[in-house]
């Protein structure tokens, strides 16, 4: 099962295009961040990101995943906001 945390990590990686900067934003070590993305890809059975020495870019699967992940994370944030307002 995909966790909310993994969705956020994937979005951070897309935003920064770099594991180190994304891990800093996620406030975890780069190795833990890398394991999170690797586990997500392993669980899904696909590569979400193409990696080279300088940048990380989404694959075609990654682009679809990231669109849905952004919507899910935004919906979860809105749900939390609504609950806090009640």
Image (cartoon, rainbow, N blue to C red):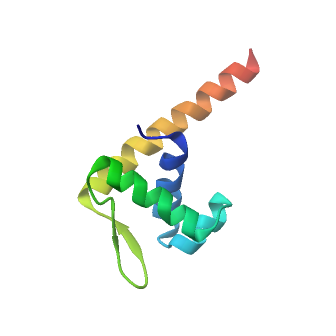
Q: Quadrant of the N terminus?
A: top left
Image-quadrant location for residue 51: bottom left
Q: Residue at x 66, y 22 (%)?
A: 82
Image position of 26 with respect to 73: above or below: below
**39 sits left or right of 12 in the view:** left
Residue 49, quarter of the rendered image: bottom left
Residue sitting at x 65%, y 62%: 28
Q: Residue furthest bottom?
A: 53
Please tell me which residue lies in front, 13 or 42. Answer: 42
Which quadrant is the C terminus positioned in?
top right
Compared with residue 70, is residue 39 higher up or lower down, i.e. above or below?
below
**From what the image shows, is residue 34 above or below residue 10?**
below
Give 2 or 10, whichever is nearer the viewer.
2
The answer to whether 22 appears left or right of 84 in the picture is left
Q: Position of residue 5 (x, y in %)?
A: 55, 46
79 horizontally vs 86: left or right: left
Residue 15 visible in image: no
Q: Residue at x 49, y 49 (%)?
A: 6
Residue 13 x, y percent position in the rendering: 49, 63
Q: Residue 12: image x %, image y %?
A: 53, 59
Q: Residue at x 63, y 58 (%)?
A: 26
């Amino acid at each position: 099962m995909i966790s909310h945390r993994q969705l956020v990590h994937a979005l951070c990686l897309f935003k920064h295009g770099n594991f180190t900067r994304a891990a800093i934003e996620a406030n975890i070590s780069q190795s833990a961040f890398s394991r999170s993305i690797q586990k997500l890809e392993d669980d899904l059975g696909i590569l979400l990101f193409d990696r080279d020495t300088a940048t990380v870019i989404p694959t075609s699967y990654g682009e679809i995943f990231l669109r849905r992940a952004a919507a899910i994370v935004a919906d979860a944030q809105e749900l939390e906001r609504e609950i806090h307002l009640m």
